[in-house]
Image (cartoon, coloured by chain):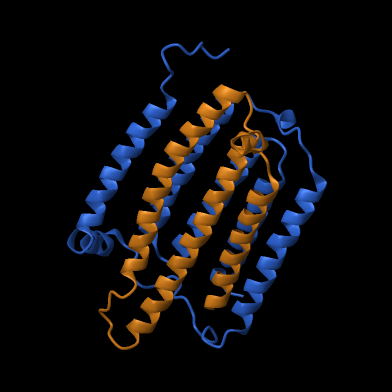
Amino acid sequence: MPIQYYITLSVVLFCIGVVGVLTRRNAIIIFMCVELMLNAVNLLMVAFSKMHHGNALATNPDSLAGVEAQLFVFFTMVVAAAEVSVGLAIIVMLYRNTHSVDVNFLNRLKN
Amino acid sequence: MSITEILFWFLSALALMGATMVVISKNPIYSIIWLIVVFFAISGHYILLNAQFIAIVNLIVYAGAIMVLFLFVVMLMNLNSQTEPQKNTWLKVAGAISGGSLMLIMVDVVRSAADMQGKTALVKEGNIGLIKNLGRVLFRDYVVPFEIASILFLSAMIGAVVIGKRERDEPAAQ
């Protein structure tokens, strides 16, 4: 497939995530939109990995070019999992103190 | 149209529709279910790109573990559609316009970039996505980051427990 298709798909997914973060007020939905953006970037990285691999195969049939990008995707998933565990703990704590997950309640640092 | 293209367009449409529904659903539980659909579609894309290891890890970690965690938290808080009381229309319009502008700019850059013309992503062939090659590189070249990731997980686990721990004089949540 042409690489532009994959880049466009990732860009659109990322921008839907951005719109979700900007418009929704529910902390859990905002968190899910962040996950959506992370996944868009992962998809882009795998597509670039396969593009690089395809270019390298033309000169060397045993080439392993492009493996690193897929490992970076793996590490992104690891960091995202850790982030989700801590972030959901923070949201549960927030709910326990304010009985709401509306991020507009979080402006109390202003005063 | 070959079967690969049909699969590509189907999975892309599924992912985009799911992502849109995540944002516009009123009920957080529907958002989570649509996000699971998005993750399945993205895993399908990985399989199409012959990145089987990433596809399976995506299914297990995201669609399996993380989404169960989200669902658990939403159920714990007993959220429903009227828990989002402040409806600011201008905020939604402004967010949609700014996000749409970002998308238009980036799509136009991708469409007109000379570097990207004629480049293709290898579909259905190439063996770098197999766990044999990935594991070899992971444990040969990236073993230190791998071990650091385990420390990161341990600290995240301890952090979650410490954050969630109730103070001694705090009253129980009703």
Q: In this structure image, what is the colour of chain A?
A: orange
Q: Is residue B144 above or below residue B24?
A: below
Q: Quadrant of residue B2?
A: bottom right
- Name the residue rendered at 29%, 38% in the picture: B154
Q: Is residue B22 visible?
A: yes
Residue at 29% from the left image edge and 59% from the top image edge:
B131
Quadrant housing residue B81: top right
Residue B36 falls left or right of residue B90: left
| Residue under the point 53% across and 33% down | A91
Q: Is residue B118 above or below residue B94?
A: below
- In terms of image quadrants, where is residue B164? top left
Residue B14 seen in render: no
For the C terminus of chain A, which image quadrant? top right
Residue at the farthest left position? B140
Is A23 displayed left or right of B37 in the figure? right
Most foreground residue, A50 or B7: A50
Image hue for chain B? blue
Left or right of B155 in this view: B35: right
Horizontal and vertical percent for residue B146?
Answer: 25, 53
In x, y percent, where is residue B10? 62, 61
Q: Position of residue A78 (x, y in %)?
A: 37, 49
Where B160 falls versus A81 (above or below)? above
**Residue A106 point in image, percent of width and height:** 61, 35
Q: How many marks?
A: 0
Task: Depth check: give the residue in front, B61 or B82.
Answer: B82
Most distant residue in the front direction = A111
Name which residue lies at 27% across and 85% down.
A60
